[in-house]
Amino acid sequence: MAVAPLPPAAELLSTVRSSCRQLRLASDIQVRTRRGAWSTILTLVLAAHLSGPSTSSPLTAAGMVASTPSTLASLINIKTHVEKDHPTLGAAVKVGEKDADAFEVLELLAGTLNETGKVLQKEGKKDLGEWVGAKLDETGGDAPKMVVELARTFSSFNDSAVVDGPPVYLFKKAFFLLNAIAERFASPSTSAIAGDDEEEDAARIFPFPVPVVSGLPIFADNVIPTMLLHLNILTLPPSSAISYPFTPSRSLSFSDAYRLRAAAVDACSTIVARARELASEPGREWLSGVTETDVDAWLWGKVGKTEEGRKVERFAEKGTAYY
Protein backbone atom coordinates (compact mmCIF):
# COMPACT_ATOMS: atom_id res chain seq x y z
CA MET A 1 0.00 0.00 0.00
CA ALA A 2 1.40 3.38 -0.98
CA VAL A 3 1.60 5.98 1.76
CA ALA A 4 1.48 9.67 0.90
CA PRO A 5 4.52 11.78 1.81
CA LEU A 6 4.38 13.33 5.24
CA PRO A 7 2.69 16.74 5.16
CA PRO A 8 4.72 19.87 5.96
CA ALA A 9 3.52 19.99 9.56
CA ALA A 10 4.92 16.55 10.27
CA GLU A 11 8.07 17.01 8.21
CA LEU A 12 8.91 20.22 10.05
CA LEU A 13 8.09 18.48 13.33
CA SER A 14 5.90 21.53 13.87
CA THR A 15 2.85 19.72 15.16
CA VAL A 16 4.68 17.32 17.42
CA ARG A 17 7.28 19.77 18.75
CA SER A 18 4.94 22.70 19.21
CA SER A 19 1.19 22.12 19.44
CA CYS A 20 1.68 18.80 21.17
CA ARG A 21 4.88 19.39 23.09
CA GLN A 22 3.07 21.46 25.71
CA LEU A 23 2.29 18.28 27.66
CA ARG A 24 3.94 18.34 31.05
CA LEU A 25 1.96 15.31 32.24
CA ALA A 26 4.73 12.90 31.33
CA SER A 27 4.26 10.60 34.30
CA ASP A 28 0.52 10.32 33.66
CA ILE A 29 1.11 9.46 30.01
CA GLN A 30 3.80 6.92 30.81
CA VAL A 31 1.70 5.09 33.37
CA ARG A 32 -1.29 4.87 31.05
CA THR A 33 0.41 4.03 27.75
CA ARG A 34 3.58 2.22 28.91
CA ARG A 35 5.49 4.71 26.76
CA GLY A 36 7.32 7.90 27.57
CA ALA A 37 5.64 11.23 26.84
CA TRP A 38 7.75 11.94 23.75
CA SER A 39 7.17 8.45 22.29
CA THR A 40 3.45 8.87 22.91
CA ILE A 41 3.30 12.16 21.00
CA LEU A 42 5.31 10.67 18.13
CA THR A 43 2.77 7.83 18.08
CA LEU A 44 -0.02 10.40 17.87
CA VAL A 45 1.57 12.15 14.87
CA LEU A 46 2.21 8.93 12.96
CA ALA A 47 -1.26 7.57 13.78
CA ALA A 48 -2.82 10.85 12.70
CA HIS A 49 -0.97 10.71 9.37
CA LEU A 50 -2.00 7.12 8.67
CA SER A 51 -5.54 7.20 10.07
CA GLY A 52 -7.41 8.95 7.28
CA PRO A 53 -7.52 11.64 4.61
CA SER A 54 -4.90 14.34 5.04
CA THR A 55 -7.61 17.02 5.06
CA SER A 56 -9.10 15.66 8.30
CA SER A 57 -5.89 14.66 10.06
CA PRO A 58 -5.13 16.33 13.40
CA LEU A 59 -1.95 17.53 11.68
CA THR A 60 -4.08 19.98 9.67
CA ALA A 61 -5.84 23.13 10.84
CA ALA A 62 -9.27 21.63 10.17
CA GLY A 63 -8.32 18.42 11.94
CA MET A 64 -6.98 20.36 14.93
CA VAL A 65 -10.28 22.21 15.28
CA ALA A 66 -12.19 18.93 15.11
CA SER A 67 -9.98 17.12 17.64
CA THR A 68 -11.65 15.87 20.81
CA PRO A 69 -10.37 13.99 23.84
CA SER A 70 -12.01 10.79 22.57
CA THR A 71 -10.47 10.96 19.07
CA LEU A 72 -7.04 11.65 20.54
CA ALA A 73 -7.44 8.84 23.08
CA SER A 74 -8.05 6.45 20.20
CA LEU A 75 -5.00 7.65 18.27
CA ILE A 76 -2.54 7.33 21.17
CA ASN A 77 -4.28 4.31 22.73
CA ILE A 78 -4.76 5.80 26.16
CA LYS A 79 -7.50 4.42 28.38
CA THR A 80 -9.98 7.00 29.65
CA HIS A 81 -11.58 4.73 32.27
CA VAL A 82 -10.22 2.39 34.91
CA GLU A 83 -11.88 -0.75 36.18
CA LYS A 84 -12.68 -0.90 39.87
CA ASP A 85 -14.56 -3.29 42.12
CA HIS A 86 -18.28 -2.60 42.41
CA PRO A 87 -18.88 -0.59 45.62
CA THR A 88 -21.44 -3.09 46.96
CA LEU A 89 -20.99 -6.30 44.96
CA GLY A 90 -17.22 -6.41 45.40
CA ALA A 91 -14.56 -7.88 43.14
CA ALA A 92 -17.02 -10.15 41.36
CA VAL A 93 -18.33 -7.17 39.41
CA LYS A 94 -16.17 -4.50 37.80
CA VAL A 95 -17.32 -0.99 36.98
CA GLY A 96 -15.67 1.59 34.75
CA GLU A 97 -14.67 4.85 36.39
CA LYS A 98 -13.52 7.97 34.57
CA ASP A 99 -9.77 8.46 34.84
CA ALA A 100 -9.48 12.12 35.78
CA ASP A 101 -5.73 12.30 35.11
CA ALA A 102 -6.08 10.75 31.65
CA PHE A 103 -8.86 13.19 30.80
CA GLU A 104 -6.72 16.11 31.97
CA VAL A 105 -4.00 15.07 29.51
CA LEU A 106 -6.45 14.63 26.65
CA GLU A 107 -8.42 17.80 27.33
CA LEU A 108 -5.24 19.86 27.55
CA LEU A 109 -4.01 18.44 24.25
CA ALA A 110 -7.38 18.80 22.51
CA GLY A 111 -7.85 22.36 23.77
CA THR A 112 -4.44 23.43 22.50
CA LEU A 113 -5.02 21.78 19.13
CA ASN A 114 -8.49 23.39 18.83
CA GLU A 115 -7.11 26.86 19.55
CA THR A 116 -4.12 26.41 17.28
CA GLY A 117 -6.33 25.18 14.44
CA LYS A 118 -8.66 28.17 14.71
CA VAL A 119 -5.71 30.58 14.58
CA LEU A 120 -4.30 28.79 11.53
CA GLN A 121 -7.65 28.95 9.76
CA LYS A 122 -7.91 32.67 10.52
CA GLU A 123 -4.40 33.11 9.10
CA GLY A 124 -5.38 31.15 5.98
CA LYS A 125 -2.89 28.32 6.61
CA LYS A 126 -3.70 24.64 6.16
CA ASP A 127 -1.30 23.45 8.86
CA LEU A 128 1.33 24.65 11.28
CA GLY A 129 4.14 23.73 8.92
CA GLU A 130 2.81 26.13 6.30
CA TRP A 131 2.56 28.94 8.87
CA VAL A 132 6.09 28.32 10.14
CA GLY A 133 7.47 28.25 6.59
CA ALA A 134 5.80 31.54 5.73
CA LYS A 135 7.15 33.20 8.87
CA LEU A 136 10.66 31.89 8.21
CA ASP A 137 10.47 33.56 4.81
CA GLU A 138 9.04 36.75 6.27
CA THR A 139 11.67 37.01 9.04
CA GLY A 140 14.58 35.66 7.01
CA GLY A 141 14.90 32.90 9.59
CA ASP A 142 15.82 35.36 12.33
CA ALA A 143 15.38 33.32 15.53
CA PRO A 144 14.40 36.18 17.91
CA LYS A 145 11.84 37.48 15.41
CA MET A 146 10.42 33.98 15.00
CA VAL A 147 10.04 33.65 18.77
CA VAL A 148 8.10 36.92 18.86
CA GLU A 149 5.84 35.78 16.02
CA LEU A 150 5.11 32.44 17.68
CA ALA A 151 4.39 34.04 21.06
CA ARG A 152 2.15 36.75 19.61
CA THR A 153 0.16 34.36 17.43
CA PHE A 154 -0.36 31.26 19.58
CA SER A 155 -1.15 31.46 23.28
CA SER A 156 0.44 28.06 23.91
CA PHE A 157 3.78 29.56 22.82
CA ASN A 158 3.41 32.71 24.92
CA ASP A 159 5.36 31.26 27.82
CA SER A 160 5.69 34.42 29.92
CA ALA A 161 4.50 35.61 33.29
CA VAL A 162 4.90 38.27 35.95
CA VAL A 163 6.43 36.63 39.03
CA ASP A 164 8.15 38.57 41.83
CA GLY A 165 8.31 41.82 39.87
CA PRO A 166 9.25 42.26 36.20
CA PRO A 167 7.95 39.94 33.46
CA VAL A 168 9.76 36.66 32.89
CA TYR A 169 10.00 35.27 29.35
CA LEU A 170 10.86 31.58 29.01
CA PHE A 171 9.32 30.63 25.61
CA LYS A 172 10.38 26.99 25.99
CA LYS A 173 8.30 25.61 23.13
CA ALA A 174 9.24 28.37 20.70
CA PHE A 175 12.95 27.80 21.33
CA PHE A 176 12.46 24.05 21.09
CA LEU A 177 10.64 24.28 17.77
CA LEU A 178 13.28 26.50 16.18
CA ASN A 179 16.02 24.21 17.44
CA ALA A 180 14.22 21.19 15.97
CA ILE A 181 14.07 22.87 12.55
CA ALA A 182 17.72 23.87 12.71
CA GLU A 183 18.82 20.37 13.73
CA ARG A 184 16.83 18.74 10.93
CA PHE A 185 17.46 21.17 8.10
CA ALA A 186 20.74 22.94 8.77
CA SER A 187 23.70 22.55 6.42
CA PRO A 188 25.14 19.02 6.27
CA SER A 189 27.30 18.05 9.22
CA THR A 190 28.26 14.91 11.07
CA SER A 191 25.15 13.27 12.48
CA ALA A 192 24.63 10.18 14.59
CA ILE A 193 21.10 9.79 13.23
CA ALA A 194 21.14 10.59 9.53
CA GLY A 195 23.74 9.70 6.94
CA ASP A 196 25.49 12.27 4.79
CA ASP A 197 23.10 11.71 1.87
CA GLU A 198 20.06 12.18 4.10
CA GLU A 199 21.43 15.43 5.53
CA GLU A 200 22.29 16.77 2.10
CA ASP A 201 18.77 15.92 0.89
CA ALA A 202 17.22 17.64 3.93
CA ALA A 203 19.27 20.79 3.39
CA ARG A 204 18.48 20.82 -0.32
CA ILE A 205 14.70 20.33 -0.11
CA PHE A 206 14.02 22.77 2.74
CA PRO A 207 12.84 25.89 0.90
CA PHE A 208 12.98 28.34 3.81
CA PRO A 209 15.74 30.14 5.72
CA VAL A 210 17.03 27.92 8.54
CA PRO A 211 17.18 29.79 11.87
CA VAL A 212 20.52 30.17 13.63
CA VAL A 213 19.92 28.89 17.15
CA SER A 214 23.39 28.88 18.70
CA GLY A 215 22.48 31.81 20.96
CA LEU A 216 19.18 30.46 22.24
CA PRO A 217 18.63 29.83 25.97
CA ILE A 218 17.72 26.41 27.35
CA PHE A 219 14.28 24.88 26.89
CA ALA A 220 13.09 25.32 30.47
CA ASP A 221 10.76 22.47 31.41
CA ASN A 222 10.50 20.46 34.61
CA VAL A 223 13.47 18.17 33.85
CA ILE A 224 16.31 20.72 33.66
CA PRO A 225 15.58 22.46 37.02
CA THR A 226 15.19 19.06 38.68
CA MET A 227 18.55 17.84 37.37
CA LEU A 228 20.22 21.09 38.47
CA LEU A 229 18.83 20.55 41.98
CA HIS A 230 19.90 16.91 41.89
CA LEU A 231 23.48 17.97 41.02
CA ASN A 232 23.44 20.73 43.69
CA ILE A 233 23.99 23.38 41.02
CA LEU A 234 20.74 24.95 42.16
CA THR A 235 19.82 25.06 45.85
CA LEU A 236 16.61 26.20 47.49
CA PRO A 237 16.74 28.89 50.19
CA PRO A 238 15.46 27.92 53.64
CA SER A 239 12.54 30.31 53.19
CA SER A 240 11.37 28.61 49.99
CA ALA A 241 7.90 27.08 49.93
CA ILE A 242 9.24 24.43 47.57
CA SER A 243 10.45 21.20 49.13
CA TYR A 244 13.00 18.98 47.42
CA PRO A 245 13.18 16.05 46.64
CA PHE A 246 9.85 16.27 44.87
CA THR A 247 7.05 13.78 45.48
CA PRO A 248 4.59 12.45 42.87
CA SER A 249 1.60 13.45 44.95
CA ARG A 250 2.43 17.15 45.08
CA SER A 251 2.21 19.65 42.23
CA LEU A 252 3.92 23.02 42.30
CA SER A 253 1.97 26.23 41.93
CA PHE A 254 2.32 28.18 38.69
CA SER A 255 4.51 30.79 40.41
CA ASP A 256 6.82 28.26 42.09
CA ALA A 257 7.25 26.29 38.88
CA TYR A 258 8.04 29.51 37.04
CA ARG A 259 10.64 30.50 39.63
CA LEU A 260 12.40 27.15 39.25
CA ARG A 261 12.32 27.25 35.46
CA ALA A 262 13.65 30.83 35.41
CA ALA A 263 16.40 29.89 37.86
CA ALA A 264 17.40 27.05 35.55
CA VAL A 265 17.71 29.43 32.59
CA ASP A 266 19.94 31.73 34.64
CA ALA A 267 22.05 28.84 35.95
CA CYS A 268 22.74 27.45 32.47
CA SER A 269 23.61 30.92 31.19
CA THR A 270 26.12 31.23 34.06
CA ILE A 271 27.58 27.81 33.25
CA VAL A 272 28.21 28.83 29.63
CA ALA A 273 29.73 32.16 30.68
CA ARG A 274 32.11 30.33 33.00
CA ALA A 275 32.96 27.80 30.27
CA ARG A 276 34.01 30.63 27.98
CA GLU A 277 36.23 32.09 30.68
CA LEU A 278 37.91 28.72 31.10
CA ALA A 279 38.35 28.38 27.33
CA SER A 280 41.33 30.75 27.53
CA GLU A 281 43.30 28.11 29.45
CA PRO A 282 45.53 25.64 27.53
CA GLY A 283 43.73 22.43 26.67
CA ARG A 284 40.30 23.89 27.33
CA GLU A 285 39.83 25.80 24.09
CA TRP A 286 36.94 23.53 23.14
CA LEU A 287 34.83 25.14 25.89
CA SER A 288 34.52 28.28 23.77
CA GLY A 289 31.99 26.48 21.59
CA VAL A 290 29.68 25.33 24.38
CA THR A 291 26.17 26.76 24.10
CA GLU A 292 23.24 26.87 26.48
CA THR A 293 21.38 24.34 24.35
CA ASP A 294 24.40 22.03 24.69
CA VAL A 295 24.08 22.29 28.47
CA ASP A 296 20.35 21.61 28.12
CA ALA A 297 21.01 18.50 26.04
CA TRP A 298 23.60 17.23 28.52
CA LEU A 299 21.35 17.72 31.54
CA TRP A 300 18.30 16.27 29.80
CA GLY A 301 19.98 13.35 28.08
CA LYS A 302 23.25 12.53 29.77
CA VAL A 303 22.03 13.13 33.32
CA GLY A 304 18.24 12.79 33.21
CA LYS A 305 18.28 9.63 31.09
CA THR A 306 20.82 7.70 33.17
CA GLU A 307 19.63 4.95 35.48
CA GLU A 308 20.18 7.24 38.46
CA GLY A 309 18.59 10.23 36.74
CA ARG A 310 15.43 8.33 35.84
CA LYS A 311 14.85 7.63 39.53
CA VAL A 312 14.81 11.35 40.39
CA GLU A 313 11.22 12.58 40.66
CA ARG A 314 10.58 15.61 38.47
CA PHE A 315 8.32 18.36 39.71
CA ALA A 316 4.79 18.55 38.35
CA GLU A 317 2.53 21.48 37.50
CA LYS A 318 -1.11 20.84 36.71
CA GLY A 319 -2.78 22.30 33.64
CA THR A 320 0.24 23.92 32.02
CA ALA A 321 0.43 24.19 28.23
CA TYR A 322 4.02 25.41 28.18
CA TYR A 323 6.07 22.23 28.76
Image (cartoon, helix red, strand yellow):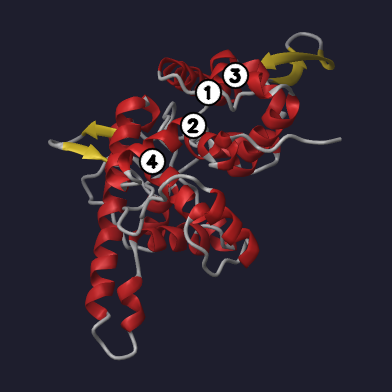
Type of amino acid under label 1: Lys
Left or right, 172 with respect to 74, comes to left
Residue hosting label 4? 136
Q: Percent position (x, y) of residue 287?
A: 33, 76
Q: State the residue at coordinates (43%, 50%).
A: 179
Marks 1/3 in contact by CB < 8 Å: the verdict is no
Residue 126 shows which numbered tag?
A: 1
Which one is in front, 87 or 241?
Answer: 241
Residue 288 in the image: above or below residue 164: below
Q: Position of residue 17 (x, y in %)?
A: 51, 40
Q: Which dot, 3 or 2, sits closer to the camera?
A: 2
Q: Hey, what amino acid is under mark 3?
A: Gly
Q: Residues within 10 Å of mark 2 (few under 14, many from 20)?
A: some
Residue 146 appears in view: yes
Foreground: 310 or 7? 7
Task: Judge the density around disc 4: few (<14), some (14-19), many (≥20) Cα neighbours within 10 Å.
Answer: many
- How many angstroms separate mark 4 from mark 3 (CA)? 24 Å
Circle 4: element type: helix
Residue shown at 58%/34% (left/top)?
28
Q: Residue furthest left?
A: 165
Task: Please name which of the two marks, 4 or 3, marks the residue nearer to the observer.
Answer: 4
Q: Which mark is residue 15?
A: none
In this picture, is 56 found above or below 1? above
What residue did someone put label 3 on? 63
Q: Secondary structure under badge 3?
A: helix
Quadrant of the rendered image containing residue 167: top left
Q: Are marks 2 and 1 in contact (CB under 8 Å)?
A: yes
Residue at mark 1 to residue at mark 3: CA–CA distance: 10 Å
| Residue to which mark 2 is pinned | 130
Mark closer to the chain start, 4 or 1? 1
Distance CA(mark 2)–CA(mark 1):
7 Å
